């Protein structure tokens, strides 16, 4: 019983988090400040409820300053695909760089060797 209630609580938290993230994306281009705040709210909610931010959103948070990034507004995104396709995301707020492999679902066995 208790466990079920917990799970329901987490499901609800997850729904709210995803809603906040989508909202953040919607308002970002016109109101970056608001988008940043929604992103922050989602992150805090996730921390408080111990819910993991969904994989497809996780890269949007800067590892350096924790800001919710929006490519083209406060983050630069470049693609690099020599041997190992990946994205390079640079936070304009703190300059932190992050590499993200493209093909998450596929295991790339041949790791780039020089
Ligand atoms: Zn940053």
Image (cartoon, grey):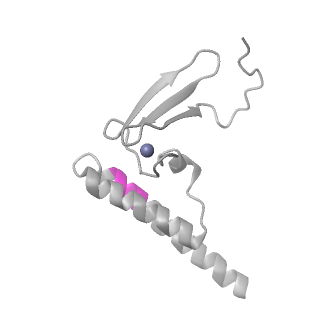
**Left or right: 72 as drawn, with respect to 56:** left
Q: Establish if 53 lies above or below 89.
A: below
14 or 86: nearer the viewer: 86
Q: Identify the residue shown where x is 67% and y is 37%.
A: 105
Prevailing secondary structure class for the magenta stretch in the rendered image? helix
**Left or right: 49 as drawn, with respect to 77:** right
Quadrant of the rendered image holding ligand 1: top left
Q: Identify the residue shown where x is 54% and y is 72%.
A: 48
Residue 22 among magenta residues = yes
Residue furthest to the right in view is 109
The image quadrant that residue 42 belongs to is bottom left
Q: Establish if 25 lies above or below 106.
A: below
Q: Identify the residue shown where x is 34% and y is 60%.
A: 37
**Left or right: 74 as drawn, with respect to 12:** left
Placement of the N terminus among the 4 image quadrants = bottom right
Residue furthest to the top in view is 114
Numbered range of the magenta stretch: 20-25
Q: Identify the residue shown where x is 53% and y is 65%.
A: 46
60 or 17: nearer the viewer: 60
């Amino acid at each position: 019983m208790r466990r079920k209630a917990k799970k329901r609580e987490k499901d609800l938290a997850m729904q709210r988090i995803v809603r906040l993230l989508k909202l953040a994306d919607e308002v970002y281009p016109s109101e970056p400040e608001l988008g940043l705040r929604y992103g922050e709210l989602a992150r805090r909610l996730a921390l408080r409820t111990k819910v993991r931010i969904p994989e497809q959103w996780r890269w949007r948070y800067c590892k350096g300053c924790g800001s919710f990034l929006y490519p083209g507004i406060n983050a630069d995104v470049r693609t690099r695909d020599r041997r190992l396709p990946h994205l390079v995301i640079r936070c304009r707020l703190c300059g932190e760089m992050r590499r993200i492999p493209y093909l998450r679902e596929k295991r790339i066995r041949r790791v780039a060797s020089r």
